[in-house]
Amino acid sequence: MTAPTGEAKIELRGLKKSFGAKTVLDGIDLSVGAGESVVIIGGSGTGKSVTLKCILGLLWPDAGSVLIDGIDVTALSGRAREAHTAKIGMLFQGSALFDSLTVWENVAFALKTRSGVSNREARNIALGKLAQVGLGSDVAALSPAELSGGMQKRVALARAIATDPEIVFFDEPTTGLDPIMGDIINRLIVDCVRQLGATAVSITHDMASARRIADRIAMLHEGRIVWDGPAGDIDSSGNDFVDQFVHGRAEGPIEMAVRG
Amino acid sequence: MNFLAPIGRVFIAFLVATGRLVAFAAVSVSHCVRPPFYGRSIGRQMIQIGYFSLPVVGLTAIFTGMVLALQSYTGFARLNAESAIATVVVLSMTRELGPVLAGLMVAGRVGAAIAAEVGTMRVTEQIDALATLSTNPYKYLIVPRLIAGVATLPILVLVADIIGVFGGYAVSVHSLDFNAANYLKLTWEFLQPLDVITGLVKAAVFGFLITLMGCYHGFHSRGGAQGVGAAATNAVVSSSVLILASNYMLTTAFFGA
């Protein structure tokens, strides 16, 4: 699914971020082609979420650049930056639905911020997106708190794709779901991304999810990309870090920080 | 010289926190005057902060007015100056007790609620989600609360003033055998518009401080349920202290030292 032009949709160059004395990102270089689905794998606390937040502009990197469509968004500020991040839809780990709003208002949230979209139109689009993730109009008027975790995830997915974004981020899409619901969400992600023709970046430590979603997999360890290759090569990477992670072994080059 | 280090650390931490708060306030206020505006959110917050605080503010005011009349009677009766009670009640209520007590009650009720709500939105990534949905969190969350606080606190204090004076009147007429018409005449006689206006200006400042501290602590909360709880506590404590401190400074500014 690599774009015919071969031009990178998102490019990270030497991205660095520290919190106090703790270095989380130590020079990330990653390029994601248009229409490509890249999954970043790695253990907890290796900086996967921080990477996404730097691209989204929720965190400012200490050094390095984030290029979206060839433009360095870290050099932009205010409105110009917002215009670029508007291209990105995001599915949050905990769904992050607004509990003060109904399901359909959540999905239609970004549509309503755009001028020229009437309430009725926004609602119709929202219902269409909900149908796309397998939810009927009967849940539209419910509050998110009344839904199960899997259904909340679906609503969050519908919200992430509501504005037909060019780029979609998935933060641990299957965490906290049972394996069956996890697979349903994975399949919905693949379908939605394909339908949009969007570029997708996911972060996960769930290998089943990574195998299903990814065209390409990148492994993050101690703030650096230690391996990057086609999803099919993940079992024959020849990389000790990747092997240890894929097989979930306690022994290997990755030493988990275990506090007694 | 090692014993100086902890003092310095605390002082630097204080300066850092103050700087962050001022920066947060500056950004929030700058968003108050730039579109887009969320009119519906402002309306909803006015009802939350203003309308639903009426009972607690009203109760506080009436008991304060009643006790003021009783206590000042005890004092003034010894000097045969009972006629001063009406003036004491109305001036104390409008200048000081109305704004300060309403402010403190609203700080407890609203400051904690704002910090808890915004803090929960922070720890469940709802604030990050807003940003990814082309919505500025300051404009959508902070600005409506600040505007509602500044707009409704003066109204609440005006209501508190009236109810407080009525409390004093009721006690004076029914328990202390004052003549009703005379009490009202004495109430009006020495009351000047400035007494009420300065109280309302104080109220607006307190409204800003309460909502600002609620939003600030909520916005910067971290670490799940415990963090949200700490944010709520900090919001109430800091806004209460700021109300009392700024009340002194405002009184000095209005009426001289």
Image (cartoon, helix red, strand yellow):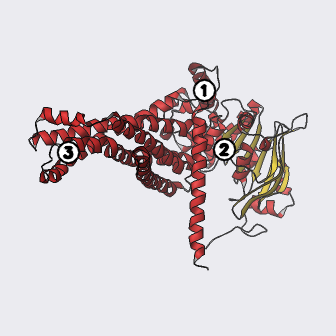
Residue at 20%, 41% in the rendered image:
B86
Query: What residue sits right under mark 2 in the picture?
Result: A183
Q: Residue furthest right?
A: A5
Decide which of A166, B207 is in the foreground and name it: B207
Q: Secondary structure at mark 2?
A: helix
Residue drawn at point x = 87 percent, y = 60 percent: A238
- Quadrant location, the N terminus of chain A: top right
Q: Amino acid at mark 2?
A: Asp
State the image coordinates of residue B51 (x, y, percent, origin top left): 36, 34
Q: Is B73 left, or right, of B20 in this rendering?
A: left
CA distance separating discs 1 and 2: 31 Å
Q: Looking at the image, is mark 3 or mark 1 nearer the viewer?
A: 3
Q: Nearer the viewer, mark 2 or mark 3?
A: 3
Residue B191 appears in the rendering? yes
Is the same chain shared between marks 3 and 1?
no
Q: List the residue tagged with mark 3.
A: B66
Q: Chain of mark 3?
A: B
Q: CA distance from mark 2 to mark 3?
A: 67 Å
Q: Disc 3 and disc 1: Cα gap in Å?
A: 51 Å
Chain of the residue under label 1: A
The percent coordinates of residue A233 (x first, y second) are: 85, 52
Q: Earlier in the sequence, mark 1 or mark 2?
A: 1
Label 3 neighbour load within 10 Å: few <14, some 14-19, many 20+: many
In-front residue for pair B45/B92: B92
Q: Is residue A144 above or below residue A224?
A: above
Q: Are marks 1 and 2 on the same chain?
A: yes
Residue B92 position by quadrant:
top left
**Which amino acid is tagged 3?**
Met
Residue A260, above or below A39: below
Give coordinates of residue B44: x percent, y percent. 45, 32
For disc 1, the marked residue is A112
Residue B51 visible? The answer is: no
